[in-house]
Image (tube, rainbow, N blue to C red):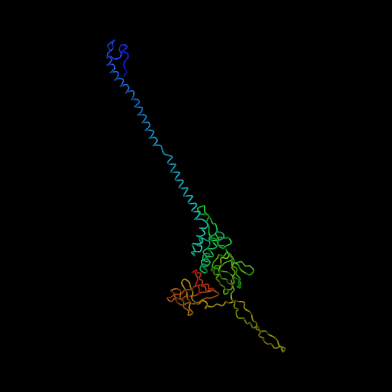
Amino acid sequence: MDKLDFCPNCGNHLDSGGEFCPNCGFNLKKYESENKSISKTNIDKRKIPVKNYDIKYHSIESDTQLDKKNVPNHSKKRKVGFILISIVAILLVAGYFGGKVYYGENYQAQRLREEVTSGTSSKMKAALVDSDGKQLTTGNISALRRLYLKDSSMIRQIESQINVNQSNKVFSLKKTGKYLMFFPKYKVMIKNQSLNINTNIDNPTFFIDGKSVPTKSENGKYKISNLMPGFYDVKVENSKESNETKTKQVVIGIDNDDKSVEFEAKKVEKPAKVITKIIHEKDEDNTTSNVNDTLVADSKEPSTISSKDSLIGEYTGNPNLTLYPNGTYELGDKNGTYDILEDDNGHVKIRYNQNNGGSIVESYYYSDGELRSSKYNQSWYKK
Protein backbone atom coordinates (compact mmCIF):
# COMPACT_ATOMS: atom_id res chain seq x y z
CA MET A 1 0.00 0.00 0.00
CA ASP A 2 1.28 3.57 -0.79
CA LYS A 3 2.22 6.03 1.97
CA LEU A 4 -0.73 8.03 3.49
CA ASP A 5 -0.72 11.77 2.74
CA PHE A 6 -3.82 12.61 4.86
CA CYS A 7 -5.23 11.22 8.07
CA PRO A 8 -8.07 8.81 7.38
CA ASN A 9 -9.81 9.98 10.56
CA CYS A 10 -9.56 13.84 10.59
CA GLY A 11 -8.17 14.59 7.15
CA ASN A 12 -5.17 16.49 8.50
CA HIS A 13 -2.16 16.65 6.20
CA LEU A 14 0.46 14.24 7.35
CA ASP A 15 4.17 14.73 7.25
CA SER A 16 6.45 11.90 6.40
CA GLY A 17 6.95 9.32 9.10
CA GLY A 18 5.02 8.97 12.34
CA GLU A 19 2.77 6.22 13.59
CA PHE A 20 -0.02 8.53 14.95
CA CYS A 21 -1.85 11.58 13.54
CA PRO A 22 -0.44 14.74 15.22
CA ASN A 23 -3.87 16.34 15.10
CA CYS A 24 -6.20 13.62 16.39
CA GLY A 25 -3.81 10.86 17.47
CA PHE A 26 -5.25 8.25 15.02
CA ASN A 27 -3.10 5.08 14.85
CA LEU A 28 -1.81 5.33 11.30
CA LYS A 29 0.43 2.24 11.46
CA LYS A 30 -2.43 -0.01 12.48
CA TYR A 31 -4.58 1.47 9.76
CA GLU A 32 -1.95 0.83 7.13
CA SER A 33 -1.50 -2.73 8.35
CA GLU A 34 -5.22 -3.50 8.19
CA ASN A 35 -5.73 -1.86 4.81
CA LYS A 36 -2.74 -3.66 3.39
CA SER A 37 -4.35 -7.05 4.23
CA ILE A 38 -7.68 -5.95 2.78
CA SER A 39 -6.01 -4.68 -0.38
CA LYS A 40 -4.26 -8.01 -0.88
CA THR A 41 -7.55 -9.84 -0.46
CA ASN A 42 -9.25 -7.59 -3.00
CA ILE A 43 -6.45 -8.10 -5.47
CA ASP A 44 -6.81 -11.89 -5.12
CA LYS A 45 -10.55 -11.56 -5.64
CA ARG A 46 -9.99 -9.53 -8.77
CA LYS A 47 -7.74 -12.27 -10.17
CA ILE A 48 -10.34 -15.02 -9.71
CA PRO A 49 -12.50 -13.99 -12.70
CA VAL A 50 -9.39 -13.89 -14.84
CA LYS A 51 -8.48 -17.37 -13.68
CA ASN A 52 -12.01 -18.61 -14.31
CA TYR A 53 -11.90 -17.02 -17.74
CA ASP A 54 -8.71 -18.87 -18.52
CA ILE A 55 -10.28 -22.16 -17.45
CA LYS A 56 -13.35 -21.42 -19.50
CA TYR A 57 -11.19 -20.56 -22.49
CA HIS A 58 -9.28 -23.80 -22.27
CA SER A 59 -12.52 -25.74 -21.92
CA ILE A 60 -13.88 -24.20 -25.12
CA GLU A 61 -10.68 -25.06 -26.92
CA SER A 62 -10.89 -28.69 -25.76
CA ASP A 63 -14.51 -28.96 -26.91
CA THR A 64 -13.53 -27.64 -30.32
CA GLN A 65 -10.86 -30.28 -30.65
CA LEU A 66 -13.35 -32.99 -29.68
CA ASP A 67 -15.82 -31.69 -32.25
CA LYS A 68 -13.13 -31.85 -34.90
CA LYS A 69 -12.47 -35.49 -34.03
CA ASN A 70 -16.16 -36.35 -34.33
CA VAL A 71 -16.53 -34.71 -37.78
CA PRO A 72 -16.37 -37.42 -40.62
CA ASN A 73 -13.21 -37.28 -42.75
CA HIS A 74 -14.77 -36.88 -46.22
CA SER A 75 -11.42 -36.15 -47.79
CA LYS A 76 -10.08 -39.59 -46.83
CA LYS A 77 -13.16 -41.35 -48.22
CA ARG A 78 -12.87 -39.46 -51.48
CA LYS A 79 -9.26 -40.53 -51.76
CA VAL A 80 -10.13 -44.21 -51.24
CA GLY A 81 -12.94 -43.97 -53.81
CA PHE A 82 -10.61 -42.40 -56.34
CA ILE A 83 -8.09 -45.21 -55.85
CA LEU A 84 -10.77 -47.89 -56.35
CA ILE A 85 -12.08 -46.21 -59.50
CA SER A 86 -8.54 -45.97 -60.86
CA ILE A 87 -7.92 -49.68 -60.23
CA VAL A 88 -11.17 -50.64 -61.98
CA ALA A 89 -10.34 -48.39 -64.93
CA ILE A 90 -6.87 -49.94 -65.25
CA LEU A 91 -8.33 -53.45 -65.17
CA LEU A 92 -10.90 -52.56 -67.83
CA VAL A 93 -8.29 -51.06 -70.12
CA ALA A 94 -5.96 -54.03 -69.61
CA GLY A 95 -8.85 -56.45 -70.22
CA TYR A 96 -9.83 -54.66 -73.41
CA PHE A 97 -6.35 -54.74 -74.91
CA GLY A 98 -5.83 -58.32 -73.72
CA GLY A 99 -9.13 -59.34 -75.32
CA LYS A 100 -8.21 -57.49 -78.49
CA VAL A 101 -5.12 -59.69 -78.78
CA TYR A 102 -6.78 -62.98 -77.70
CA TYR A 103 -9.84 -62.45 -79.90
CA GLY A 104 -7.82 -60.94 -82.74
CA GLU A 105 -8.20 -62.37 -86.23
CA ASN A 106 -4.74 -63.99 -86.25
CA TYR A 107 -5.21 -65.77 -82.91
CA GLN A 108 -8.69 -66.97 -83.86
CA ALA A 109 -7.41 -68.18 -87.24
CA GLN A 110 -4.71 -70.21 -85.51
CA ARG A 111 -7.19 -71.90 -83.15
CA LEU A 112 -9.73 -72.53 -85.93
CA ARG A 113 -7.05 -74.00 -88.20
CA GLU A 114 -6.12 -76.53 -85.52
CA GLU A 115 -9.78 -77.48 -84.93
CA VAL A 116 -10.65 -77.84 -88.63
CA THR A 117 -7.70 -80.17 -89.31
CA SER A 118 -7.93 -82.06 -85.99
CA GLY A 119 -9.93 -84.96 -87.43
CA THR A 120 -12.24 -84.81 -84.38
CA SER A 121 -15.87 -84.48 -85.46
CA SER A 122 -17.00 -82.28 -82.54
CA LYS A 123 -14.14 -79.78 -83.00
CA MET A 124 -14.54 -79.67 -86.78
CA LYS A 125 -18.29 -79.15 -86.50
CA ALA A 126 -17.82 -76.27 -84.02
CA ALA A 127 -15.32 -74.48 -86.28
CA LEU A 128 -16.92 -74.89 -89.74
CA VAL A 129 -19.90 -73.19 -91.39
CA ASP A 130 -21.30 -73.09 -94.91
CA SER A 131 -21.57 -69.99 -97.11
CA ASP A 132 -24.79 -69.00 -95.28
CA GLY A 133 -23.08 -69.19 -91.88
CA LYS A 134 -24.92 -72.39 -90.90
CA GLN A 135 -23.26 -75.28 -89.09
CA LEU A 136 -22.31 -78.30 -91.20
CA THR A 137 -24.10 -81.64 -91.00
CA THR A 138 -22.57 -84.81 -89.61
CA GLY A 139 -22.41 -86.21 -93.17
CA ASN A 140 -20.33 -83.25 -94.36
CA ILE A 141 -17.91 -83.68 -91.46
CA SER A 142 -17.63 -87.43 -92.08
CA ALA A 143 -16.78 -86.91 -95.76
CA LEU A 144 -14.10 -84.35 -94.88
CA ARG A 145 -12.56 -86.69 -92.29
CA ARG A 146 -12.40 -89.45 -94.91
CA LEU A 147 -10.62 -87.01 -97.21
CA TYR A 148 -7.93 -86.46 -94.55
CA LEU A 149 -7.43 -90.23 -94.27
CA LYS A 150 -7.32 -90.69 -98.04
CA ASP A 151 -4.92 -87.82 -98.73
CA SER A 152 -3.06 -86.31 -95.76
CA SER A 153 -1.62 -83.55 -97.97
CA MET A 154 -5.09 -81.97 -97.96
CA ILE A 155 -4.52 -80.94 -94.33
CA ARG A 156 -1.57 -78.71 -95.25
CA GLN A 157 -3.45 -77.24 -98.21
CA ILE A 158 -6.46 -76.39 -96.03
CA GLU A 159 -4.21 -74.79 -93.38
CA SER A 160 -2.61 -72.69 -96.12
CA GLN A 161 -5.99 -71.47 -97.40
CA ILE A 162 -7.09 -70.47 -93.89
CA ASN A 163 -3.83 -68.57 -93.34
CA VAL A 164 -4.16 -66.71 -96.65
CA ASN A 165 -7.87 -66.01 -95.99
CA GLN A 166 -8.91 -65.06 -99.51
CA SER A 167 -12.56 -65.01 -100.51
CA ASN A 168 -11.86 -66.89 -103.76
CA LYS A 169 -10.59 -69.93 -101.84
CA VAL A 170 -12.72 -72.86 -100.70
CA PHE A 171 -11.70 -72.30 -97.05
CA SER A 172 -11.75 -68.75 -95.65
CA LEU A 173 -12.68 -66.85 -92.48
CA LYS A 174 -16.19 -65.49 -91.99
CA LYS A 175 -17.51 -63.15 -89.27
CA THR A 176 -20.41 -64.84 -87.48
CA GLY A 177 -20.95 -62.60 -84.43
CA LYS A 178 -19.10 -60.99 -81.53
CA TYR A 179 -17.34 -62.02 -78.34
CA LEU A 180 -18.26 -59.95 -75.25
CA MET A 181 -20.07 -57.42 -77.52
CA PHE A 182 -16.74 -55.90 -78.61
CA PHE A 183 -14.59 -58.42 -80.46
CA PRO A 184 -15.50 -60.01 -83.84
CA LYS A 185 -16.14 -63.76 -83.86
CA TYR A 186 -14.86 -65.83 -86.78
CA LYS A 187 -15.60 -69.28 -88.21
CA VAL A 188 -14.10 -71.13 -91.17
CA MET A 189 -16.44 -71.03 -94.15
CA ILE A 190 -16.46 -73.79 -96.80
CA LYS A 191 -17.70 -73.08 -100.29
CA ASN A 192 -20.01 -75.56 -102.01
CA GLN A 193 -18.91 -77.27 -105.20
CA SER A 194 -20.64 -79.33 -107.88
CA LEU A 195 -20.19 -82.83 -109.27
CA ASN A 196 -20.87 -83.34 -112.99
CA ILE A 197 -21.71 -86.92 -114.00
CA ASN A 198 -21.75 -88.43 -117.46
CA THR A 199 -23.24 -91.94 -117.57
CA ASN A 200 -24.54 -94.53 -120.01
CA ILE A 201 -27.05 -95.84 -117.47
CA ASP A 202 -30.63 -95.32 -118.53
CA ASN A 203 -33.15 -93.70 -116.17
CA PRO A 204 -30.41 -92.95 -113.65
CA THR A 205 -30.94 -92.25 -109.97
CA PHE A 206 -28.07 -91.00 -107.85
CA PHE A 207 -26.96 -91.85 -104.33
CA ILE A 208 -24.23 -90.32 -102.15
CA ASP A 209 -23.13 -92.35 -99.13
CA GLY A 210 -26.29 -94.42 -99.46
CA LYS A 211 -28.71 -91.46 -99.60
CA SER A 212 -30.65 -90.42 -102.68
CA VAL A 213 -29.74 -86.94 -103.95
CA PRO A 214 -31.44 -84.67 -106.50
CA THR A 215 -29.71 -83.88 -109.78
CA LYS A 216 -30.13 -81.43 -112.62
CA SER A 217 -29.80 -82.58 -116.23
CA GLU A 218 -27.78 -80.33 -118.55
CA ASN A 219 -26.85 -81.31 -122.14
CA GLY A 220 -27.05 -85.02 -121.43
CA LYS A 221 -25.02 -84.71 -118.22
CA TYR A 222 -26.18 -84.69 -114.65
CA LYS A 223 -25.15 -82.19 -112.00
CA ILE A 224 -25.15 -82.66 -108.22
CA SER A 225 -24.79 -79.30 -106.45
CA ASN A 226 -23.93 -78.18 -102.92
CA LEU A 227 -21.18 -80.70 -102.20
CA MET A 228 -18.54 -79.88 -99.61
CA PRO A 229 -14.94 -81.04 -100.02
CA GLY A 230 -14.73 -84.68 -99.01
CA PHE A 231 -14.49 -88.33 -99.98
CA TYR A 232 -17.84 -89.75 -101.11
CA ASP A 233 -19.35 -93.05 -102.21
CA VAL A 234 -21.36 -92.19 -105.33
CA LYS A 235 -23.74 -94.70 -106.85
CA VAL A 236 -25.72 -94.48 -110.09
CA GLU A 237 -28.36 -97.05 -110.90
CA ASN A 238 -31.15 -97.58 -113.38
CA SER A 239 -34.40 -96.86 -111.59
CA LYS A 240 -36.13 -99.54 -113.69
CA GLU A 241 -33.37 -102.14 -114.02
CA SER A 242 -31.82 -102.98 -110.67
CA ASN A 243 -28.92 -104.90 -112.25
CA GLU A 244 -27.72 -101.81 -114.14
CA THR A 245 -25.67 -99.92 -111.56
CA LYS A 246 -22.25 -98.39 -111.01
CA THR A 247 -20.52 -97.26 -107.81
CA LYS A 248 -17.43 -95.07 -107.50
CA GLN A 249 -15.57 -93.27 -104.77
CA VAL A 250 -15.24 -89.62 -105.68
CA VAL A 251 -13.01 -86.94 -104.19
CA ILE A 252 -14.32 -83.37 -104.09
CA GLY A 253 -11.14 -81.37 -103.65
CA ILE A 254 -10.36 -77.83 -102.51
CA ASP A 255 -9.28 -76.33 -105.84
CA ASN A 256 -12.62 -74.50 -106.26
CA ASP A 257 -13.33 -76.30 -109.56
CA ASP A 258 -16.34 -78.49 -110.27
CA LYS A 259 -15.56 -82.21 -110.43
CA SER A 260 -16.47 -84.28 -113.50
CA VAL A 261 -16.67 -88.08 -113.49
CA GLU A 262 -17.78 -90.84 -115.86
CA PHE A 263 -20.10 -93.64 -114.74
CA GLU A 264 -19.96 -96.28 -117.47
CA ALA A 265 -21.73 -99.51 -116.62
CA LYS A 266 -20.59 -102.57 -118.54
CA LYS A 267 -23.45 -103.97 -120.52
CA VAL A 268 -23.59 -107.48 -121.96
CA GLU A 269 -26.38 -108.22 -124.35
CA LYS A 270 -28.38 -111.32 -123.69
CA PRO A 271 -28.35 -114.08 -126.35
CA ALA A 272 -30.55 -113.22 -129.29
CA LYS A 273 -34.00 -114.67 -129.19
CA VAL A 274 -34.65 -116.98 -132.15
CA ILE A 275 -38.18 -116.76 -133.47
CA THR A 276 -39.32 -119.28 -136.00
CA LYS A 277 -42.09 -118.14 -138.25
CA ILE A 278 -43.90 -120.69 -140.36
CA ILE A 279 -45.05 -119.30 -143.70
CA HIS A 280 -47.58 -121.22 -145.68
CA GLU A 281 -46.91 -120.87 -149.39
CA LYS A 282 -48.53 -122.48 -152.38
CA ASP A 283 -46.43 -124.08 -155.04
CA GLU A 284 -47.29 -124.01 -158.65
CA ASP A 285 -49.00 -127.32 -158.20
CA ASN A 286 -51.12 -125.82 -155.45
CA THR A 287 -49.33 -127.87 -152.82
CA THR A 288 -48.62 -126.22 -149.59
CA SER A 289 -45.13 -126.18 -148.16
CA ASN A 290 -43.90 -124.89 -144.83
CA VAL A 291 -41.00 -122.47 -144.84
CA ASN A 292 -39.16 -121.88 -141.63
CA ASP A 293 -38.14 -118.24 -141.54
CA THR A 294 -35.79 -117.57 -138.67
CA LEU A 295 -35.84 -114.05 -137.27
CA VAL A 296 -33.33 -112.74 -134.78
CA ALA A 297 -34.61 -110.30 -132.21
CA ASP A 298 -32.02 -108.27 -130.39
CA SER A 299 -32.45 -108.03 -126.71
CA LYS A 300 -32.05 -104.58 -125.17
CA GLU A 301 -31.84 -105.89 -121.63
CA PRO A 302 -28.33 -105.34 -120.24
CA SER A 303 -26.53 -107.48 -117.77
CA THR A 304 -23.37 -106.90 -115.78
CA ILE A 305 -20.12 -108.76 -115.36
CA SER A 306 -18.76 -109.25 -111.88
CA SER A 307 -15.58 -110.82 -110.59
CA LYS A 308 -15.36 -112.35 -107.15
CA ASP A 309 -11.63 -112.87 -107.51
CA SER A 310 -11.06 -109.10 -107.39
CA LEU A 311 -12.17 -109.08 -103.75
CA ILE A 312 -9.72 -111.74 -102.60
CA GLY A 313 -6.64 -110.41 -100.85
CA GLU A 314 -5.33 -108.56 -97.80
CA TYR A 315 -6.85 -105.28 -96.59
CA THR A 316 -5.53 -102.77 -94.10
CA GLY A 317 -8.05 -101.25 -91.72
CA ASN A 318 -9.19 -101.35 -88.14
CA PRO A 319 -8.96 -104.29 -87.75
CA ASN A 320 -7.12 -105.75 -90.76
CA LEU A 321 -9.08 -108.09 -93.05
CA THR A 322 -7.82 -110.98 -95.19
CA LEU A 323 -9.98 -112.92 -97.67
CA TYR A 324 -8.10 -116.09 -98.67
CA PRO A 325 -8.66 -117.87 -102.03
CA ASN A 326 -9.62 -121.08 -100.17
CA GLY A 327 -12.75 -119.40 -98.76
CA THR A 328 -11.43 -118.62 -95.28
CA TYR A 329 -10.99 -115.19 -93.70
CA GLU A 330 -9.31 -113.40 -90.82
CA LEU A 331 -10.77 -110.21 -89.34
CA GLY A 332 -8.59 -109.09 -86.46
CA ASP A 333 -8.70 -111.95 -83.93
CA LYS A 334 -11.74 -113.53 -85.61
CA ASN A 335 -11.61 -116.17 -88.34
CA GLY A 336 -13.78 -118.63 -90.22
CA THR A 337 -15.14 -119.10 -93.71
CA TYR A 338 -16.83 -116.57 -95.99
CA ASP A 339 -19.29 -116.57 -98.87
CA ILE A 340 -19.57 -113.75 -101.40
CA LEU A 341 -23.31 -113.43 -101.79
CA GLU A 342 -23.23 -110.48 -104.18
CA ASP A 343 -20.61 -108.65 -106.22
CA ASP A 344 -22.47 -106.42 -108.64
CA ASN A 345 -20.65 -103.37 -110.03
CA GLY A 346 -19.16 -102.40 -106.71
CA HIS A 347 -22.05 -103.48 -104.50
CA VAL A 348 -20.78 -106.37 -102.39
CA LYS A 349 -22.36 -108.62 -99.77
CA ILE A 350 -20.22 -111.07 -97.79
CA ARG A 351 -21.41 -113.63 -95.26
CA TYR A 352 -18.89 -114.39 -92.53
CA ASN A 353 -19.24 -117.83 -90.89
CA GLN A 354 -17.36 -117.73 -87.61
CA ASN A 355 -15.52 -120.81 -86.34
CA ASN A 356 -17.10 -120.48 -82.90
CA GLY A 357 -20.57 -120.50 -84.41
CA GLY A 358 -22.90 -117.92 -85.89
CA SER A 359 -22.71 -115.89 -89.07
CA ILE A 360 -23.23 -112.29 -90.15
CA VAL A 361 -23.82 -110.63 -93.52
CA GLU A 362 -22.09 -107.31 -94.24
CA SER A 363 -22.63 -104.94 -97.18
CA TYR A 364 -19.85 -102.91 -98.80
CA TYR A 365 -19.04 -100.64 -101.70
CA TYR A 366 -15.95 -101.83 -103.56
CA SER A 367 -13.95 -99.56 -105.88
CA ASP A 368 -10.27 -99.22 -106.76
CA GLY A 369 -9.14 -101.52 -103.98
CA GLU A 370 -11.20 -99.90 -101.23
CA LEU A 371 -13.86 -101.87 -99.38
CA ARG A 372 -16.18 -99.29 -97.81
CA SER A 373 -18.75 -100.00 -95.08
CA SER A 374 -21.43 -97.34 -94.60
CA LYS A 375 -22.69 -99.23 -91.56
CA TYR A 376 -19.41 -98.81 -89.68
CA ASN A 377 -18.39 -95.60 -91.49
CA GLN A 378 -14.92 -96.94 -92.31
CA SER A 379 -12.90 -98.42 -95.16
CA TRP A 380 -10.46 -101.26 -95.73
CA TYR A 381 -7.75 -100.72 -98.36
CA LYS A 382 -6.34 -103.57 -100.41
CA LYS A 383 -2.58 -104.05 -100.22
Q: What x and y, as percent, mark residue 118? A: 49, 64
Which residue lies most toward the right here?
284
Q: What x and y, as percent, mark residue 248? A: 56, 71
Please identify the quarter of the rendering in which residue 205 is found.
bottom right
In depth, the one of 259 and 84 nearer the eye is 84
Which residue lies most toward the bottom here?
285
In depth, the one of 119 and 341 nearer the eye is 119
Look at the picture and state if 74 lies above or below 140: above
Q: What x and y, as percent, mark residue 37? A: 29, 20
Look at the picture and state if 366 lies above or below 139: below
Q: How many circles with numbers are drawn on the protein?
A: 0
Please identify the quarter of the rendering in which residue 216 is found.
bottom right
In depth, the one of 189 and 301 nearer the eye is 189
| For residue 92, side relative to residue 260 (left or right) | left
Viewport quadrant of the N terminus: top left
Q: What x and y, as percent, mark residue 222? A: 61, 68
